[in-house]
Structures are given as structure tokens and as C-alpha cells.
């Protein structure tokens, strides 16, 4: 034991052996569910958007600095890989946006019934698909 | 008759909780994540719509747009609140997945430093853009 908290991890198997309790969730045992999948998506998109936040600052700094540095950012963002990344960030943004709104509804104490949770989960996925498609379409029209 | 194995913890409940979970700043962190997320709802919508008008435009168009006082104000709010929200979120991710104390602390400090410096860089850029206009 390295920490007093470890004492709380002592458990017993059915045949009586004492074991160190495993931490939940056990992803290899859990059946995949829409609830857990959407939860980890929220995290993954949040981390992806962090990269986007640094790109946003790069773009702002370049615009404030010189024509050359702005041309560099533009070239990167207008390349096929840049466009692909922007489309990915758009999808991540709308997902995190919609799932975040769902979290705020939960924080207000509503929508916890299992049926409602599943319905709002599907709604988040549909809304993300529609908003992403509209944004990408509008983006290519504006370009 | 078999007895359950027991482990006597010779510290008070308060002593064990202090410096952990609820005895730290978890509630303030949780609340700040929510407040920043509410602020980011209108700011994100505004930014996405603004970007449409700037797509493919030259630097001068970005300068003119960011030079507008209202746009500069909203951009500052977007940068500050986004990086605050991001740092809080990434901190929780690191706390959950990096189990050893030393690398976890180092990762969080490095992430906070990067987030803070990039936020300051973004703020400086917006100020430069609005003053140059």
C-alpha cells in the first residue's frame, strides 16, 4: 500500500481471496451503449477542439503580424489536409456543442429517465450531422 | 463462521478527505466549467457565422473585421473563455488517465502554461488588430 486510499480498494473474490479492486469502468466487460459511447465522444471531441483552439490563435496572430505569415496560415488551411481538418473540427464542434447543451439540461435536473436519455442522445447525433452538413455546405459556397 | 477481512484506517474522515476530492476546489471547478460553457454557446454561434464571411478573404478583410470594436470585444471573450474552458476540461482528462502523481502534475502544469501563453498570444493579436485598424 502506497496510500491510505489503497485500503478502500481491498475486495474479496467469490472464493474468499482478497484482491485489489479493479477500477471501473471495465471497458472489456461493458456492453457498448449509446450513453457511454456519447460520453466518451464528448471527451474526445473536447480534446480535438483544444487543438483547434491553438490553430485559432495561430490564425489571429498571423493576421495581426504580416502578410507572409497570414499567407502561410491560409495556405495550410486551404490545402486538402487543412480542409479535412477544418471539416473534422466542425463536426467535433457541433457534437461538443449539442452534447454540452444536453449536459446543461441534465445539470438543471431534467431528462434523466432512460427513455429520455436515449432519445436526447439520438437527437444530439442527428443535430450534429445536420449542423455539420449545413456548415460545410455553407463554407464551400462562401469559399 | 467466516469473518469479512477488515482494514482499520486510523485517520479521521476529515483527515482523509482533506486535500482530496470534495475538500479541494472541485465544486468551483465544476461550476466554472458550466458557466464558461453557457458563455461559449452564443460566442461559438457568432464566431461560426463570422467565419463564413471571412472564408477565402485576404488579410485586409480579417483586419477590418477584427478591427471593429464589437468584433474585437467578442473575440477577446471567445479566446479567454475558450482557453479557460479548455484548460479545465483537459485537466480533468489528465487527472482521470494519468495515474502516477508526478507525471500527472507535470502534464497539468505544462498544459496550463501552454493554454495561458496561447490565450495571452491570442489576446495580444486581437489588441494589435483592433489598434492597427
Image: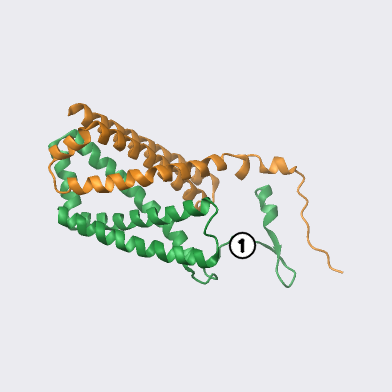
Chain colours: A green, B orange
Percent position (x, y) of residue B69? Answer: 25, 31
> How many labels, in total?
1
Residue A84 seen in the figure: no
In the rendered view, does A20 fall on the left or right side of A50?
right
Percent position (x, y) of residue A8? Answer: 69, 54
Read off the chain for label 1: A
Residue sitting farthest toward the top: B131
Percent position (x, y) of residue B120? Answer: 33, 33
Residue B31 seen in the figure: yes
Task: Say what secondary structure mark 1 lies in.
Answer: loop
In the rendered view, does B91 fall on the left or right side of A137?
right
The residue at the point 58 percent across, 61 percent down is A24
Quadrant position of residue A40: bottom left
Q: Is residue A13 above or below residue A48?
A: below
The residue at the point 63 percent across, 40 percent down is B23
The residue at the point 60 percent across, 45 percent down is B21
In the rendered view, does A138 fall on the left or right side of B121?
left
Q: Is residue B16 above or below residue B127?
A: below
The residue at the point 80 percent across, 63 percent down is B4
Question: Disc 1 designates what residue?
Answer: A22
Q: Nearer the viewer, residue B69 or A45?
A: B69
Q: Nearer the viewer, residue B59 or B2?
A: B59
Q: Nearer the viewer, residue B17 or A110?
A: A110
Percent position (x, y) of residue A84? Answer: 23, 58
Amino acid at each position: 500500500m502506497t496510500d491510505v486510499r489503497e485500503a478502500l480498494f481491498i475486495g474479496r473474490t467469490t472464493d474468499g481471496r482478497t484482491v485489489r479492486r479493479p477500477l471501473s469502468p471495465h471497458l472489456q466487460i461493458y456492453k457498448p451503449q449509446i450513453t457511454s459511447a456519447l460520453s466518451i465522444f464528448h471527451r474526445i471531441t473536447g480534446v480535438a477542439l483544444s487543438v483547434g483552439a491553438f490553430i485559432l490563435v495561430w490564425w489571429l496572430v498571423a493576421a495581426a503580424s504580416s502578410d507572409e505569415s497570414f499567407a502561410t496560415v491560409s495556405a495550410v488551411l486551404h490545402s486538402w489536409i487543412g480542409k479535412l481538418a477544418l471539416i473534422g473540427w466542425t463536426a467535433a464542434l457541433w457534437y461538443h456543442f449539442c452534447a454540452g447543451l444536453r449536459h446543461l439540461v441534465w445539470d438543471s435536473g431534467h431528462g434523466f429517465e432512460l427513455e429520455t436519455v436515449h432519445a436526447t442522445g439520438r437527437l444530439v447525433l442527428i443535430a450534429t450531422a445536420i449542423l455539420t452538413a449545413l456548415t460545410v455546405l455553407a463554407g464551400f459556397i462562401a469559399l | 463462521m467466516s469473518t469479512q477481512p477488515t482494514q482499520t484506517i486510523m485517520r479521521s474522515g476529515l483527515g482523509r478527505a482533506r486535500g482530496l476530492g470534495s475538500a479541494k476546489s472541485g465544486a468551483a471547478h465544476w461550476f466554472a466549467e458550466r458557466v464558461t460553457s453557457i458563455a461559449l454557446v452564443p460566442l461559438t454561434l457568432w464566431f461560426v457565422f463570422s467565419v463564413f464571411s471571412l472564408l477565402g478573404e485576404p488579410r485586409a478583410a480579417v483586419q477590418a473585421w477584427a478591427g471593429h470594436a464589437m468584433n474585437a470585444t467578442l473575440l477577446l471573450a471567445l479566446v479567454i473563455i475558450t482557453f479557460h474552458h479548455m484548460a479545465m476540461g483537459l485537466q480533468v482528462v489528465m487527472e482521470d488517465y494519468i495515474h502516477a502523481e508526478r507525471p500527472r502534475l507535470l502534464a497539468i502544469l505544462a498544459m496550463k502554461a501552454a493554454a495561458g501563453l496561447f490565450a495571452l498570444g491570442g489576446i495580444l493579436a486581437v489588441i494589435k488588430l483592433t489598434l492597427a485598424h
